[in-house]
Image (cartoon, grey):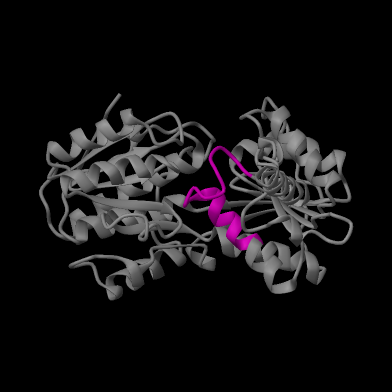
Amino acid sequence: MKRILAIILAVVLAVSMVACGAPQTSTPSESAAPSESAPAESAGGDGKFELALITDIGTIDDKSFNQGSWEGLKKYAEEKNITHKYYKPSEKSTDAYLSSIELAVKGGAKVIVTPGFLFEEPIFIAQDTYPDVKFILIDGNPHNADYSEFRTEKNTVGIVYAEEQVGYLAGYAAVKDGMTKLGFLGGMAVPAVVRYGYGFVQGADAAAKELGLADGSVSVNYHYTGGFDATPEAQTLAASWYQAGTEVIFACGGAVGNSAMAAAEQANGKVIGVDVDQSAESPTVITSAMKGLGVSVYDMIKAYYDGSFPGGEGLVFSAANNGISLPMENSKFEKFTQADYDALYKKLAANEIAIVKDTDEAGKEVKVTDIKTTAVKTTVVE
């Protein structure tokens, strides 16, 4: 018996020693959550991270806006062996965004990327608070809370995209490919999402006219969910559209796309992705309305290290500088060809096609029902 007790005691002591010597795993806070692609060992000897990204609504693996921006930062960082990290704000608010920016600065960030127009006000403040830090604001330009002052300092660059152009490409391609019952399922009605939708409607109308289709022969169901999350409500709405005959839905709102894809998979429907190539997300994705998130972030970081950072500027990435596109190599069109795409893209790049955007020349808000189309009938679904 004594011998058995001695053996048991020895085993217990051995297990205890192993447990005491094992590394401890802690869960980082939401406001400073590191990416799996940027583990702690990517920090410098002083534990600092030179490049940082603050996520917008959503996550770093949203297969959309945050992820596209992060991939551009990560690509440059890994090529040049530069330490990098992302931070996730605790909530959607200017204070929470500023807190994450402060964490990044304290963590050694020299360049901070902020994807999303909701960062316009935080960067307006942060560019003054941290004059030695460079800010790359994606999808917007800095302004104060009441929009009475727009100001981009020398340590900041604002980047926006011609979403209306790539939305136009997507709508045009869908109708050229033979589809006449379309849907637009947007997230929040922010400027970028609105421009995607307006371009989509106008591109569909242009293609229908070229094909000689009768007035009102193309229909578009149009709805904003009010958020960027995948929800049962969004999936149910998409499912009802497919059941009523909708052939393809342009899902434009981060994880809202996952709701549309889930509905499409059950109904044998089709989906057009957004922001990045989402063809790997679901077999229902026939193409994606892409903007060069990764490329623009990569180029701006490269400009910083090359000593040519375009601080104080507001840049536009459009067809003219290959800032938007459809991934034709991964698209599943049956009739819309590469030649069709190239011809239309050339016209967009030359600014030969006028597209109504979210505001008119005087800055007044434009509603989708204000857009004059003949072949396309747009129904706003509340």
Q: Please state if 148 lies on the left or on the right of 269 as rendered.
A: right
Residue 50 lies in what quarter of the image? bottom right
Looking at the image, residue 67 lies above or below residue 237: below
Residue 193's x, y, as percent? Answer: 45, 41
Can you give x and y, in whole percent of width and height, for residue 252 in the image?
39, 44
Q: Residue at point 32% right, 52% down? A: 272
Q: What stretch is highlighted in magenta?
A: 55-73
From the viewer's perspective, is 138 left or right of 154? left
Residue 264 horizontal/vertical position (percent): 23, 46
Pick out the residue farthest to the front. 1
Which residue is nearer to you in this view: 62 or 187? 62
Quadrant into which the C terminus falls: top left
Q: Between residues 353 and 246, which one lies in front from this camera angle? A: 246
Q: Quadrant of the N terminus?
A: top right
The residue nearer to you, when weighing 351 against 17, is 17
The answer to if 70 sits in the magenta stretch is yes
